[in-house]
């Protein structure tokens, strides 16, 4: 059975460039880095440092949030990565479901994302664009800009019909976390958060909770922010009641503490460890191989694994062993 190509994603930190270099050695196709400044370090700095440490692996934002960075700043950042690692950059972009909500703001509208992507592509073709009521273009001095046009793939992080429609029109691929985007995508990347169990290891062990508990907790976060019925999750109603009791000024801070990387004190107390098995990409090697095959059969072309916990190299190595090296390397 075919399996998707294997990529990885990182909660961006000081060690991320070294972890991306390891991912290249292990055969991963692409490395995506998060753009959420209330939670992570700067993705563009991480990508530039990783570009100096690597020669093959693709480098991507996973995902950039337009409202967090001016159009021209993003264009210059892409040009910087391109100048160090020609042809290896992919722009993952989204509405800021985490990046903006962690600041207490709502995500962007999809029309705004589409406008941003369109203008960004034009700038990197060397064209002038109208932005904020003014004409703008890249005007770097000779030798300070890679040759134009700078070509790069665009993936949109989308789950619902509006986002998927924008992705079909304005992007080369789609990124999903909790849903199937449906057929007809040449490039369909699916996030996988969890851990590969050691032989005989309990899914409720301390190691598994540190490496994958965050992946169960993020489902609770998603249900809460999307307005889904929390009672459908174990202890979900009780978990939500604590969040509801917070003031609006502190609620988004508590909700996103540890988001996508570690289990917060609140989540540790309220979320049963058994949820890891049902809600995350966690299981034995054989179980996860079967899940990868199922993803491929549903049209997923790339699985993006985000390691977490105290031992990122262990997680990367264990996940890479799930598939043949020729598949991992794409």
Image (tube, rainbow, N blue to C red):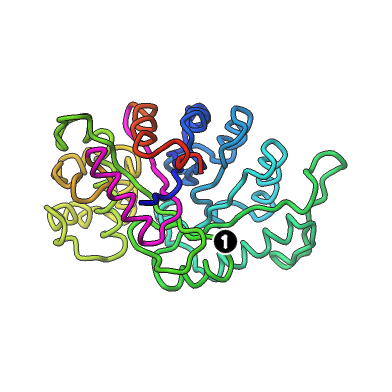
Q: Is residue 30 above or below residue 167?
A: above
Nearer-the-camera pick, 202 or 67: 202
Residue 223 is situated, as x and y percent measured from the top left of the image, at: 26, 60
**Can residue 89 be found in the magenta stretch?**
no
In front: 78, or 305?
A: 305
User: Is residue 258 found left or right of 209 in the rendered image?
Assistant: right
Q: Is residue 86 above or below residue 92?
A: above
Provide the secondary structure element on which disc 1 rests.
Answer: loop
Kindly identify the residue that appears in the image at 27 percent across and 53 percent down: 219
Q: Is residue 84 left or right of residue 251?
A: right
Q: Quadrant of residue 299?
A: bottom left
Q: Is residue 298 magenta?
A: yes
- The reply, left or right, for residue 128 in relation to residue 279 is right
- Locate residue 276, reporting x and y percent: 20, 44
Is 231 placed above or below 213 here? below
Residue at (19, 65) in percent of width and height: 229
Residue 189 screen position, x and y as percent: 45, 54
Say which residue label 1 marks.
Answer: 172
Residue at (39, 51) in percent of width and height: 2
Label 1 CA crowd tier, 10 Å (few <14, some 14–19, many 20+):
some
- The residue shown at (62%, 62%) is 116
Give 216 or 269, whichever is nearer the viewer: 216
- Magenta part of the chain: 284-310
Residue 323 locus on image (x, y percent): 38, 39
């Amino acid at each position: 059975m075919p399996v998707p190509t294997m990529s990885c994603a990182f909660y961006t930190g000081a060690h991320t460039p070294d972890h991306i270099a390891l991912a290249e050695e292990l055969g991963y196709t692409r490395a995506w880095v998060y753009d959420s400044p209330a939670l992570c370090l700067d993705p563009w700095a991480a990508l530039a440092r990783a570009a100096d440490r690597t020669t093959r692996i693709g480098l991507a934002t996973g995902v950039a949030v337009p409202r967090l960075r001016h159009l021209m700043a993003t264009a210059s950042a892409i040009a910087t990565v391109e100048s160090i690692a020609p042809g290896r950059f992919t722009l993952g972009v989204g509405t800021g479901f985490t990046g903006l909500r962690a600041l207490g703001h709502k995500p962007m509208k999809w029309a705004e994302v589409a406008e941003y992507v369109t203008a960004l592509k034009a700038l990197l073709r060397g064209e002038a664009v109208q932005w904020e009521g003014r004409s703008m273009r890249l005007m770097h001095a000779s030798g300070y800009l890679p040759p134009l046009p700078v070509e790069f793939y665009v993936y949109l992080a989308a789950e619902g019909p509006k986002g998927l429609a924008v992705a079909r029109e304005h992007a080369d691929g789609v990124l999903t976390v909790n849903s199937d985007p449906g057929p007809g995508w040449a490039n369909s990347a699916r996030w996988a958060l969890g851990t590969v169990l050691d032989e005989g290891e309990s899914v409720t062990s301390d190691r598994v909770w540190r490496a994958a508990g965050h992946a169960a907790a993020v489902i609770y976060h998603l249900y809460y922010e999307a307005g889904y019925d929390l009672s459908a999750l174990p202890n979900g109603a009780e978990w939500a009641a604590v969040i509801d009791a917070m003031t609006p000024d502190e609620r988004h801070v508590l909700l996103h503490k540890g988001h996508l990387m570690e289990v917060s004190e609140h989540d540790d107390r309220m979320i049963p460890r058994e949820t890891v098995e049902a809600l995350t990409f966690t299981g034995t090697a054989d179980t996860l191989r079967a899940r990868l095959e199922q993803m491929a059969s549903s049209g997923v072309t790339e699985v993006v694994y985000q390691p977490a916990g105290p031992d990122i190299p262990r997680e990367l190595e264990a996940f890479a062993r799930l598939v043949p090296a020729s598949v991992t390397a794409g």
